[in-house]
Amino acid sequence: MNILMLNYEYPPLGGGASPVTKSLAEELVKLGHTVDVVTMGFKGLNQREEIKGVNIYRVPSIRKKQSVCQTHEMFSYCLSAYYFLQKLLKKNEYDINHTHFVLPTGIVSYFLRKFKFKGLPYVITSHGSDIPGYNPDRFHLAHKIIQPLWKKIIENSEYVICPSQSHKELILGNVSVENKTKVIPYGFNFSKFKSIEKQKKILLSSRLLKRKGFQYFLEAIWNLDIDYEINILGDGPYIESLMQKAKEVKANINFRGWIDNSSQEYRRFFEEASIFVFPSSSESFGVVLLEAMASGCAIITTDVTGCPEVVGDAALLVRPKSSEDIRNALIKLINNKKLISELGAKARKRVEENFTWEKIAKQYVSVYKDVIIEGVK
């Protein structure tokens, strides 16, 4: 089938949902489908290219940073994509439009279907911040203003696909669409990460936002006698606060900045780390957890939203915003090398058994076929 895929972010731009989109698109091509991606342009990137069989179209935008996209920059993509797609859809015929994010990308799909191409159904994969209440620190006002349109985008879709059950419940708390919500987890190319001999290193990696909870990790190790090197990967609006807080901690802490997650340097940080800490208070899924699991890290993460669904019993779970819990979990691991090894092996096994991209892509194909065969609801 011919699949149109929309996401305002696609590698090398963006965070967790960006590589997810790329991996899914490439796996769909492996399964014999045609995939055209329309995404955001950025300085130095080709307007059109083919990568691993995926046709990529990049439309103009006013985006300034590779790792972070502001709200007004997102909507510059929406405007460009809307006009570009009117030309593309006259030239190419697609069976389905797979849209990533209700906001901002869903705006494009909704208006295209309502006013221009009523015969092209769309499904949405929601990733997190596109749902009201998921990331109130960043998008509370935007969601409040655009709530009526948000509901229309959902209601006019064929399906809303969620990466976790907790994420599905968050959507249903905002709009009653039980009959069109499905849970499909993210897949992962686990073979890219190797489980090698571990070093005395602790790793944290994410966009540096307040809800990621890295401040509670710093509080946890404030006066802890720890001879591990601590590396923090990522960039974001909360970095200055974290760096200021880290000055009060005597441990060896290194802020490494944003690193391309497809690079060997990025993988090396995971492969060498014995312990991975991800104390986020709100995650739809947490792709970074899969990276840590594939690398055989002993993981400490929170017991809320999507995190426990990803790690299962292959991690130590702590309460969100609890530096005391993080401290106790760290001490437990640091004093028990055998437990570090056991949790790392269990994590790697869980990734291999549950999150292959082939398995996940086939679930998406099943959804596409259901929409195409049944027609517009």
Image: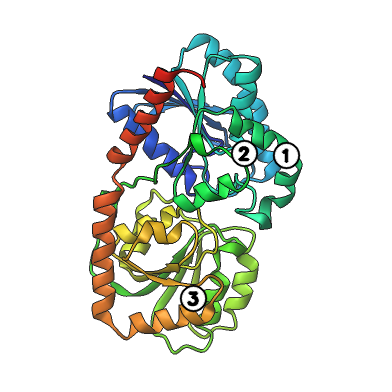
Q: Is residue 312 left or right of 120 when viewed as pictured?
A: left
Residue for badge 1: 146
Identity, as a three-letter code, of the amino acid under mark 3: Ile
Residue contact at pointers 1 and 2, CB within 8 angstroms: yes
Q: Residues within 10 Å of mark 2 (few under 14, many from 20)?
A: many
Mark 2 or mark 3: which is in front? 2
Direction top: furthest residue: 90
* Residue plotted at (60% across, 60% down): 209
Identify the residue under disc 2: 103
The image position of residue 122, as x and y in percent, is: 51, 26
Label drawn at residue 32: none
> Which element is circle 1 on?
helix
Residue 266 place in picture, x, y as percent: 39, 57
Q: Is residue 338 left or right of residue 136?
A: left
Please name whichever residue, 125 or 2, is drawn nearer the observer in this view of the structure.
Answer: 125
Tell me where residue 153 appears, x and y as whole percent: 62, 31
Q: CA distance from mark 1 to mark 2?
A: 9 Å
Q: In the image, 15: left or right of 77? A: left
Q: Is residue 245 above or below residue 204?
A: below
Q: Residue at x 53, y 35 (%)?
A: 7
Is residue 52 among the parts visible in the rendering? no
Q: Residue 253, which numbered label?
A: 3
Q: Amino acid at mark 1?
A: Ile
Q: CA distance from mark 1 to mark 3?
A: 41 Å
Residue type (three-letter) at the residue carrying disc 2: Leu
In the rendered view, tell whether residue 78 sits above or below residue 191: above
Residue drawn 25% across the image and 64% down it: 346
Q: Secondary structure at mark 2?
A: loop
Residue sitting nearer the eye, 374 or 279: 374
Is tag 2's residue or tag 3's residue first in the polypeptide sequence?
2
